[in-house]
Amino acid sequence: MLRASILFTLLIATASHTPSATAQSVSGRLLQVLQEQGTARVVVVFEPPDAASDDGEVRREAIRTTREDVLARLAPGQLRLAHAYDHVSAFSGDLDAAGLEVLRSDPRVLAVGLDE
């Protein structure tokens, strides 16, 4: 239930956001956990597909494609994927500091937050 609450909060916070390469939301707490522990369990929110399509299957495929493209930028070991969501533009996993920098440089990534 807590994961769903965090994901919902991140999605609401980024719903009206116009992405840019330097505007991703990253908390100071996430940076602290990465510094102390080397990795952190995170939820990553990326650009949703075009809202013009009401077809659920088309939307799921667009989410999957974008998610795979974002994940493909990460080097092996930078993220251990825990969950890939089908109906929302997000995934969760254990991320290291190098992986965070890769995600922060991706304009499709809207937010990276601790999955607590």
Image (cartoon, helix red, strand yellow):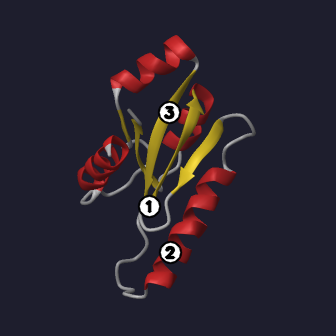
Residue 83 placed where, x, y %? 55, 50
Judge left or right: residue 58 versus residue 20.
Answer: right
Judge left or right: residue 20 versus residue 79.
Answer: left
Q: Determine the CA span between mark 1 and mark 3.
A: 17 Å
The residue under label 1 is: 89
Residue 106 placed where, x, y %? 53, 49
The residue under label 2 is: 60
Indicate whether 74 appears above or below 61: above
Comparing marks 1 and 3, which lies closer to the viewer?
3
Indicate whether 31 appears above or below 79: above
Q: Determine the CA span between mark 1 and mark 2.
A: 9 Å
Residue at x 63% of width, y 60% of height: 68
What SS does tag 2 mark?
helix
What SS does tag 1 mark?
loop
- Res. 74 image quadrant: top right
Q: Earlier in the sequence, mark 1 or mark 2?
A: 2
Whether tag 1 and tag 3 are in contact, CB under 8 A, the answer is: no
Residue at x 37% of width, y 44% of height: 3
The residue under label 3 is: 41
Amino acid at pointer 2 = Arg
Whether tag 1 and tag 2 are in contact, CB under 8 A, the answer is: no
Residue 115 placed where, x, y %? 41, 36
